[in-house]
Image: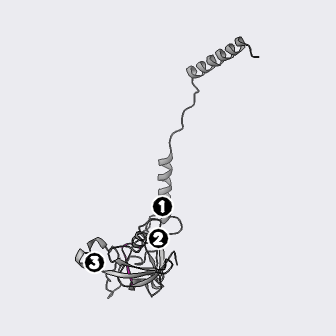
Amino acid sequence: MVELAGLLGGATLTLIVVAFHYAKGTGWEAPEDISQEVLEQRAASVPETDFAEPYNRSIGGGGAAAIPAGGAEGELAEGEEAEEEDEGFDPDSIADDEVEYYEIEFAKEGETIEVANNETILDAGEEEGWDLPYACRQGQCISCAGHIQDGPAEDYIRHSQNESLFEDDMEDGYCLTCVAYPVDDFTIETSESP
C-alpha cells in the first residue's frame, strides 16, 4: 500500500515544479504570421490574364475550367453581328398571364408531368418526390445533367445559367436540369452527363 506521506510529498513537489514553470515562463514566442506576404509573392509571380477564375477556386469546383456554352467573349469581326443569347434568362420576369406548361416525360422515373416555363426541370422532379442528382444548383457543375432524347437541348429548354456545357454537348441534347426551363414538350433521361 502507498504511504500517505510519500503521496503528499510527490503531489507537493509536482505543484512546486508547475508553479516555478509558469512563474518563469517557457520563453517560446509564436512566429510572425507570413501568410499574407506569401500570398502576395505568389500573386506577383503569376502573369495577368483575361481568363476567368479557375473552377477549382469556386464553390463546388474541382477539375479544369470549361468555356461556357456561349463561347469566349471577344471583339466581333468586320460585318459580324452580335447574336442575342439566352444568357441571363430570368424566369422571374415571366408575367403570371404568360406562364406556359409543357409535358415533360421523365424516362427513368416512368412518368410524364406538366412543368411551367418558369420552373426548373430539377424543381419539378423534386416536387414529385423523386431523388434527382444535383450539387451547386447554379449551372456551374454537371451533377444535375440530363439528356433530352428528342434532339438538341436548345430546341426544348432555356438555361438561366450555364458554365459547364459546351455547344456540342447541348447539340447532343444535354442540359443542366437545375437551371433548365422548358420551352416545348420533350423526354428527358436524368442522371446522364456528356
C-alpha distance separating marks 1 and 3 = 37 Å
Q: Is residue 85 left or right of residue 16?
A: left
Graded by Cα atoms within 10 Å as few (under 14), some (14 to 19) or many (20 or more), the crowding at tag 3 reads few
Q: Nearer the viewer, mark 1 or mark 3?
A: 3
Label 1, on which residue?
57
C-alpha distance separating marks 2 and 3 = 24 Å
Graded by Cα atoms within 10 Å as few (under 14), some (14 to 19) or many (20 or more), the crowding at tag 1 reads few
Viewer-proximal residue among 22 and 182: 182
Q: Label 3 amino acid? A: Val
Viewer-proximal residue among 116 and 177: 116
Against 50, residue 13 (above or below) is above
Q: Earlier in the sequence, mark 1 or mark 3?
A: 1
The residue positioned farthest toward the right in the image shown: 1
Q: Main secondary structure of the magenta part?
A: loop
Q: Label 2 amino acid? A: Trp
Q: Is residue 177 left or right of residue 88?
A: right
C-alpha distance separating marks 2 and 1 = 31 Å
Q: Earlier in the sequence, mark 2 or mark 1?
A: 1
In percent of width and height, residue 179 lies at 39, 72
Label drawn at residue 99: 3
Residue at figure coordinates x 70%, y 16% from the top left: 7
Q: Where are the magenta residues, as a range?
A: 156-165
In percent of width and height, residue 24 lies at 57, 21
- Examine the rendering and report whether any part of residue 122 can be seen: yes
- Examine the rendering and report whether any part of residue 95 can be seen: no
Against 151, residue 161 (above or below) is above
Tell me whether circle 2 and circle 3 mark residues in contact (CB < 8 Å): no
